[in-house]
Amino acid sequence: MSQSTAVLQAVLVDLVDLGLQGKQAHWNVGGPFFRSVHLELDEVVGQLLEWQDEVAERISALGGHPDGRAATVASGSTVAPLAGGPLRDVDVVTGFSDRLAAASAAISARFGEAEADLPSQDVLIGIVAGLDKAAWFFRAQVA
Ligand SMILES: [Fe+2]
């Protein structure tokens, strides 16, 4: 596995976990802001699915083999775990703002590892910009 595909694989695992957590929260959120948070989570999950596909197919394009299996995600994700059961809307807002910002920071910290592979670095930069925007959309609700 090349250096850039290793970074892409690590990013893929976190993006899959974030997507799963987004759906989990979409189903379990409650509170006065239920509707907007419920809908916003699905928008973010849609973006996460697109990014997952972009990253996974970049790995394939480089001759690698993306691994998005549940066991791989469970053992490799760096995303903070999400509690089971009911979730308060305000906790979801802050929790996802934090998780998206953390994912952005984790990817940004690894830009240098993809320096020799600018198309992959470009993919990662685009995802970071999107994660930052999604984190802001949540953060602005509790500003
Ligand atoms: Fe739904």
Image: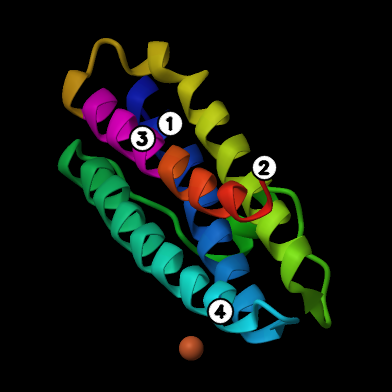
**Identity of the residue drawn at 35% across and 60% down:** 47
Which amino acid type corresponds to the residue marked 1 in the rendered image? Answer: Ala
Please report whichever mark, 2 or 3, sits nearer to the chain's N-terminal start. Answer: 2
Q: Residues within 10 Å of mark 1 (few under 14, many from 20)?
A: some
Q: Which residue is mark 1?
A: 6
Magenta region, mostly helix, strand or loop?
helix
Quadrant of the rendered image containing residue 95: bottom right
C-alpha distance separating marks 4 and 2: 24 Å
Q: Nearer the viewer, mark 2 or mark 1?
A: 2
Q: Nearer the viewer, mark 4 or mark 2?
A: 4
Mark identifier at residue 129: 3
Q: Is residue 32 above or below residue 138?
A: below
Task: Please give left or right for residue 71 compared with residue 30 in the image.
Answer: left
Please report whichever mark, 4 or 1, sits nearer to the chain's N-terminal start. Answer: 1
- Scheme of image coloration: rainbow
Was residue 127 drawn as part of the magenta stretch in this picture?
Answer: yes
**Identity of the residue drawn at 36% across and 35% down:** 129
Asked whether mark 3 and ligand 1 are closer than 8 Å, the reply comes as no
Mark identifier at residue 36: none
Q: Which residue is mark 4?
A: 38
**Residue numbers of the magenta segment:** 120-130
C-alpha distance separating marks 2 and 1: 15 Å
The N terminus sits in image quarter: top left
Quadrant of the rendered image containing residue 118: top left
Please report whichever mark, 3 or 4, sits nearer to the chain's N-terminal start. Answer: 4
Asked whether mark 4 and ligand 1 are closer than 8 Å, the reply comes as yes
